[in-house]
Image (tube, rainbow, N blue to C red):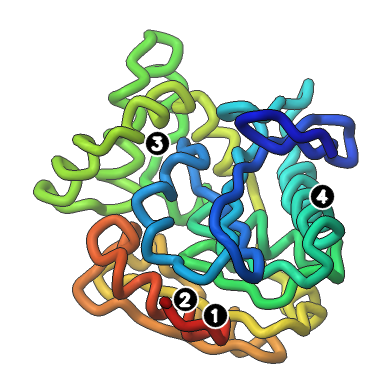
Amino acid sequence: MTRTDEATLVVSRDGTEIAYWSSGEGAPLLLVHGTTADHTRWLPLVPYLRGTEVCMMDRRGRGASGDGPGYDLAREFEDVAAVVDAIAERSGCPVDVLGHSYGGECAFGAAALTSNIGRLVLYEGWPQQHPHAEVLPPGIIERMNSLLTAGEREKVLELMFREVVGMPDAEFAAYRALPVWQVRIAAAHTIPREFAVNLFHPDAAAKITVPVLLLVGGDSPDLIKADYETVAAALPDARVSIFEGQGHVAMDFIPDVFAERVLAFLGRTAA
């Protein structure tokens, strides 16, 4: 583990450097972002996570983190586990993890690789029962790849958020105005690779013995919140919390409520 003025660099199992930032004091909480984002997507939420050392990682291929020669979802599991282990070694205590969307899938996979996770919060991010090719809008991956070839990166984002995530017009307009939008444009090429198959296996879920909270947007499309009841039933210690009237990015629209619910599950209170 190497510390810099801006980030801490952790070497993952395959030798790739993964960066994370930390702020605040208290028990550590690692935030794992979703598709096209980097650690900055969490910055508006940080002030609400009081009494916590908030750690925010850049997933591989984004921001200050490196990227391996070929993509494999298993490497992302290893990345999260490596950062968790580094934080646990430094802090001397277990690390709670909050993963959003694809970052939730990465956190779910990491739970099998480290014993240093205390509690796990997954916001619409877990393996699903059906291959993405069966549930995604027909031809969307091919359309995205064609747009990337043509340099139309922002249109790739529009496809994802409108046709996959199902954002309504007003929410999409507000989301597009956020500072992190430019980060998402830069990472648009990572979207197709994240539609690789990551199927849900009950036996794998049964081995995750830490307490798990599944967060669900009440207005999220079925594709996004699919299988949460099945996943919860397969986990030894899980509960579900639904954000009524919200979709896939509740932390951006009701950060106070979002943080309160997360902190309550972690056994903390906002000071």
Indicate which disc residue 262 carries.
2
Residues at marks 2 and 1 touching, judged by CB atoms closer than 8 Å = yes
Circle 1 residue: 213
Residue 100: image x %, image y %? 50, 58
Q: Quadrant of the N terminus?
A: top right
Which amino acid lies under the numbered mark 4 shown in the image of this protein? Ala
Give percent across and percent down for residue 10.
Answer: 80, 39
Q: Secondary structure at mark 4?
A: helix
Up/down of 133 relative to 235, above or below: above
Q: Earlier in the sequence, mark 2 or mark 4?
A: 4
Expressed as whole percent of the image width and height from the top left, the position of residue 224 reads: 41, 61
Query: Where 218 sits versus 84, above or below?
Result: below
**Of callouts 2 and 1, the N-terminal one:** 1
Q: CA distance from mark 1 to mark 4?
A: 22 Å
How far across and how far down the image is residue 254, in percent?
25, 66
Q: How many numbered discs?
A: 4
In this rendering, the label closer to the viewer, 2 or 3: 2
The reply to whether callout 4 and callout 3 are in contact (CB within 8 Å) is: no
Using the image, determine if residue 213 lies above or below residue 5: below
Residue 108: quadrant of the picture: bottom right
Q: Secondary structure at mark 1?
A: strand
**Mark 1 is on which residue type?**
Leu
Name the kind of residue labelled 3 in the image. Ile
- The residue at 73%/51% (across/down) is 80
Can residue 103 be seen in this snapshot?
no
Reading the image, the residue beneath label 4 is: 82
Of labels 3 and 1, earlier in sequence is: 3
Say which of marks 1 and 4 sits in front: 4
Q: For the residues carrying marks 4 and 3, which lies nearer the camera in this image?
A: 4
Choose the circle earlier in sequence order: 2 or 3: 3
